[in-house]
Amino acid sequence: MLSNLDGGVHLDDAMEVSPQVPVHGSDDDAREGESTRALLRAAAERAANYLESLSARPVVPTAAAVAALARLDAPLPQHGSDALQTLAMLDELVSPATVAMAGPRFFGFVIGGSLPAALAANWLAGAWDQNAAFGSVTPGVARLEQSALRRLVALFELPRETAAGFVTGATVANFTALAAARHSVLARAGWNVEADGLFGAPPITVIAGEEAHPALFKSLGMLGMGRERIVRVACDSQGRMRADALPPIAGPTILCLQAGNVNSGAFDPFGPLIEQARLGGAWVHVDGAFGMWAKATASLRRLVDHMEAADSWSTDAHKWLNVPYDSGLAFVRDAHALKAAMAISADYLPQAGGDRNPSDFTPEMSRRARGVEVWAALQSLGRAGIAEMIERNCRQARRFAAGLSAKGYAVLNDVVLNQVLVSFGDAARTRRVVSRLQAEGTCWCGITLWQGHTAMRISVSNWSTGDQDVELSLEAMLRAAASV
Ligand SMILES: Cc1ncc(COP(=O)(O)O)c(C=O)c1O
């Protein structure tokens, strides 16, 4: 499928821009154009003001800002508002009620911000409003997305023949890749799952670690493979699947591994697990929602050694690549399996012909060209910029761990990536510290349960987080802990 990714456009090369063809319209058109321009300028101005406020404002909104949202309960008005006024309502009512997730001191879940180039690309792509389903109909974005996918396959050092698709996030990326897995293991057993469904199909054994992300089980459930039927393999103290606990593999089998545990950041040992899976003929899938990005660095890439020996991979761009939501990626070594699971055709739809139809590789047919922001992020950072961002966030995570443990608080995980788990004592005390920290507003961290212990979770994955933000946040954490 490389030929599909490798469409022959080399966007690194200087591009010649042809002069704009003048379009003559009426005075009304001109006035309309002027007011659209004024509106977009106003939106840009408001967005820039918002972003500039993020570093100084509390991460959480005030109670008054949240209470003001009651105005949104108003019914649909009979007559519409002027667009500038609509924009002002959005900004004045909702901006103050947002959480500063895009800012440098939000450490909850695994949340990236938006790189300036990615955000600007998102605006431009919004203006383009391309339906990215068909290569021949929207050649510009189709080729751009191919370029981004080709670059990602190279960055992650996946097999050259890998096929890929842009989806909404890692949950749907898992769904997409696992649909290809389901196709492949059943096809090998002589069953066509797309044609005949799962009724009467040979059973598939699905194996995943005890510490696999719930999104994986959701995807498997949606694919009819039963959340409760999955064979769960024991993990070690860091949440890594134990290779010695892998059951014998026989018959149609899918083994699901993980690059980056959502709590500890730990990686399953790919080498021994994939070797055993290969002997049993299983399909191996890697959920690498954020951990896969370790591959882009010199200092962390050993964590994903042998990852490329799997059959499929999923990751997010809206996490560590720092593009706007919603942006996930599904990669499948066997392009035929992915296409068999996802392809669509109808008499009125353009057939792929020489072009790659993106809708043959994703669950969606119509979709926005979310690859535009991915391409812009990759282009603006380059390999060195991506590595610097990932390594800096991991160094910052280690700084949090060192600063908290120096004051006697227990760090519960080996900080191998960007995730830190901290206990401030018993569960009740840890919860009180985190509530105090969240309310104070310097930074935001969440709560989790890690192997029976309640812990504060720190996840560092924002491009704009500076060392000064880490020091400010560390002081806030220590203040919260001292006050409880
Ligand atoms: C390992 C893993 N898989 C899947 C997901 C789900 O990602 P998304 O919310 O983008 O669907 C996450 C989210 O944190 C994750 O950490």
Image (cartoon, helix red, strand yellow):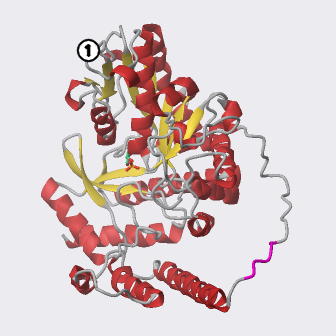
Residue 22 highlighted magenta (yes or no): yes
Name the amino acid, label 1: Gly
Check the image and report above or below for 318 versus 151.
below
- The percent position of residue 272, horizontal first and vertical second, equals 46, 18
Q: Residue at x 68, y 60 (%)?
A: 380
With 307 as the anchor, is 453 left or right in this view?
left
Q: Which image quarter is the N terminus in?
A: top right
Element carrying mark 1: loop
Q: Residue at x 39, y 67 (%)?
A: 474
Q: Residue at x 42, y 88 (%)?
A: 88
Check the image and report above or below for 203 versus 381.
above
- The percent position of residue 323, horizontal first and vertical second, equals 53, 59
Q: Can residue 467 be seen in this snapshot?
A: yes
- The percent position of residue 341, horizontal first and vertical second, equals 45, 29
Magenta segment's dominant SS is loop
Q: Image quadrant of residue 185?
A: top left
Residue bearing the label numbered 1: 200
The boundaries of the magenta stretch are: 20-24
Q: Residue at x 43, y 48 (%)?
A: 169
Front-most of 324 and 59?
324
Q: Image quadrant of residue 414?
A: top left
With 445 as the anchor, is 349 left or right in this view?
right
- The percent position of residue 446, horizontal first and vertical second, equals 29, 59
With 313 as the anchor, is 174 left or right in this view?
left
